[in-house]
């Protein structure tokens, strides 16, 4: 919505105009950030209820941050002043009002003399500690344009890899959901109807049929209790995972799972190496870069070792020395490449070589997983549904042949 405002500048001059914001409070905040003292603020026109936008659907996505970073990097490298570049981005943003307001807020703070990195830190849900650290390093070195380019490329690579992993999980999830749906339909509708016919014949039923009928009766009788127990277990595990002890337990467990473990290790190693390389390339001290990277990896087992490496670096030890103590999660090739980079002073380049290798391996594993998972899931679906139907229809076949 738009507001007409009247305000005074710091030197007492009267200024008026129009500001766009989601509420009167946000509009006042935006004006105050531009060092204006608001004396009058009123809405230009109040739209009908059905015309108002539902802000819950206007979340700022990871893709929005990537696009913002890339466009800002291009404009800044074209010698457009930072404040002007931010204002241009805000003006062209017409779909996501929340994003537009944040860009305007950042622009107002920068125009008021606040550092760009400090203005970004006001929105930690939108800009991570890694993002802010890279911008701060660019400001300190006078290479903000290069830092923004690094950020845009890094975020795009991570976004592509995450999308591939999420895409790989969609098909198995759909198949498992379909299996569950089919089993429930059979348990509550198909098998009970067939069972009533079998009981009317009075024929003695084979063991598989008896087991399936007994299991069906048990599920129907205790379905609510089973459902409530399942939901309760999921809630308990989710809460336990949020605790420090639970996160460490599950993160270590996932790394040991056959098939899943090697894939997760490659993913975390690639994320750790790329983030650390990007931060070091941006000019951050290695200890500080390790501290920031430990929060980005999002696995408690890796975070524990990375924080130990940070403490070791502060004492003068090389990173590879600490990584070598955890061969279960940092393979020999990884810490040897880190060791070579430390000795030659090209740690960032050595890490990027590791990233390229692990990203290719991760993509290859995703493709192999999808190619092998499809027939396995189809076989699993066939065994479940076919097994249930065979057990129930076996006595009916005997009746017909008799």
Image (spheres, rainbow, N blue to C red):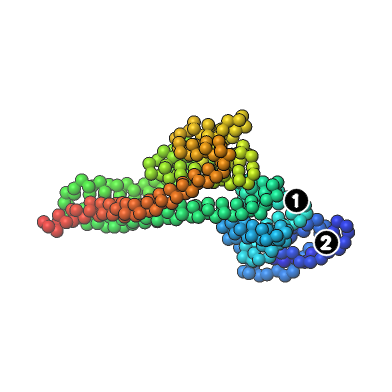
Is residue 158 among the parts visible in the rendering? yes
Residue 388 lies, in percent from the top left, at: 26, 52
Q: Which mark is residue 7?
A: 2
Residue visible at 69% across and 47% down in the picture: 141
Residue furthest to the top in view is: 315
Question: Which one is nearer the viewer's eye here, 150 or 167?
Answer: 150
User: From the viewer's perspective, is 64 left or right of 246?
Assistant: right
Residue visible at 60% across and 33% down in the picture: 313
Residue 124 lies, in percent from the top left, at: 64, 49
Is residue 124 among the parts visible in the rendering? no
| Label 2 environment density (alpha carbons within 10 Å; few <14, some 14–19, many ≥20) | many
Q: Taking 112 as reference, is 245 above or below it?
A: above
Quadrant location, the C terminus: bottom left
Q: Which callout, 1 or 2, points at the residue further toward the start of the chain?
A: 2
Residue visible at 33% across and 56% down in the picture: 182
User: From the viewer's perspective, is 71 left or right of 357?
Assistant: right
Residue furthest to the left in view is: 402
Give the structural element (helix, strand or loop) at label 1: loop
Give the structural element (helix, strand or loop) at label 2: strand
User: From the viewer's perspective, is 379 left or right of 77?
Assistant: left
Question: Which one is nearer the viewer's eye here, 98 or 371?
Answer: 371
Label 1: which residue?
114
Residue visible at 38% across and 41% down in the picture: 258
Question: Which one is nearer the viewer's eye here, 377 or 236?
Answer: 377
Quadrant location, the N terminus: bottom right
Q: Taking 55 as reference, is 329 above or below it?
A: above
Residue 148 lies, in percent from the top left, at: 63, 53
Q: How many marks?
A: 2
| Label 1 environment density (alpha carbons within 10 Å; few <14, some 14–19, many ≥20) | few
CA gap, disc 1 to disc 2? 21 Å
Q: Residue 168 appears in which quarter of the rendering?
A: bottom left
The mark closer to the camera, 1 or 2, is 1
């Amino acid at each position: 919505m738009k507001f007409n405002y009247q305000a005074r500048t710091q030197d007492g001059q009267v200024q008026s105009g129009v500001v766009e914001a989601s509420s009167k409070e946000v509009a006042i905040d935006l004006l105050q950030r531009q060092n204006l003292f608001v004396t009058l603020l009123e809405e230009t026109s109040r739209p009908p209820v059905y015309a108002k936008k539902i802000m819950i659907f206007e979340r700022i996505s990871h893709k929005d941050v990537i696009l913002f970073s890339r466009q800002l990097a291009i404009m800044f490298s074209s010698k457009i002043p930072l404040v002007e570049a931010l204002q241009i981005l805000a003006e062209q943003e017409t779909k996501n009002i929340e994003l537009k307001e944040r860009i305007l807020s950042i622009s107002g703070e920068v125009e008021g003399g606040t550092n760009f990195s400090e203005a970004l830190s006001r929105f930690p849900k939108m800009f991570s500690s890694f993002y802010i650290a890279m911008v701060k390093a660019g400001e300190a070195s006078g290479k903000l344009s290069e830092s923004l380019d690094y950020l845009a490329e890094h975020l795009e690579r991570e976004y592509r890899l995450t999308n591939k992993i999420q895409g790989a999980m969609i098909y198995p999830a759909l198949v498992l959901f379909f299996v569950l749906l089919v089993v429930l339909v059979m348990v509550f509708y198909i098998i009970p109807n067939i069972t009533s016919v079998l009981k009317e014949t009075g024929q003695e039923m084979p063991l598989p049929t008896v087991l399936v009928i007994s299991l069906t009766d048990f599920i129907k009788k205790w379905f609510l209790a089973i459902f409530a127990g399942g939901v309760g277990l999921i809630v308990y595990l989710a809460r336990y995972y949020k605790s420090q002890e639970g996160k460490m337990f599950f993160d270590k467990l996932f790394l040991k799972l056959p098939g899943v473990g090697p894939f997760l290790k490659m993913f975390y190693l690639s994320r750790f190496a790329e983030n650390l390389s990007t931060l070091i390339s941006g000019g951050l001290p290695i200890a500080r870069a390790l501290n920031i990277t430990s929060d980005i990896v999002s696995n408690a087992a890796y975070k524990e070792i990375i924080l130990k490496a940070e403490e070791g670096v502060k004492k003068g030890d090389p990173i590879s020395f600490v990584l070598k103590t955890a061969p279960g999660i940092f393979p020999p090739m990884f810490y040897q490449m880190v060791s070579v980079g430390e000795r030659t002073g090209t740690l960032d380049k050595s890490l990027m070589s590791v990233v390229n290798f692990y990203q290719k391996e991760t993509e290859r594993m995703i493709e192999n997983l999808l190619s092998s998972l499809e027939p396995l899931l189809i076989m699993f679906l066939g065994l479940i549904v076919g097994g249930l139907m065979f057990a129930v229809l076996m006595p009916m076949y005997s009746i017909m042949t008799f």
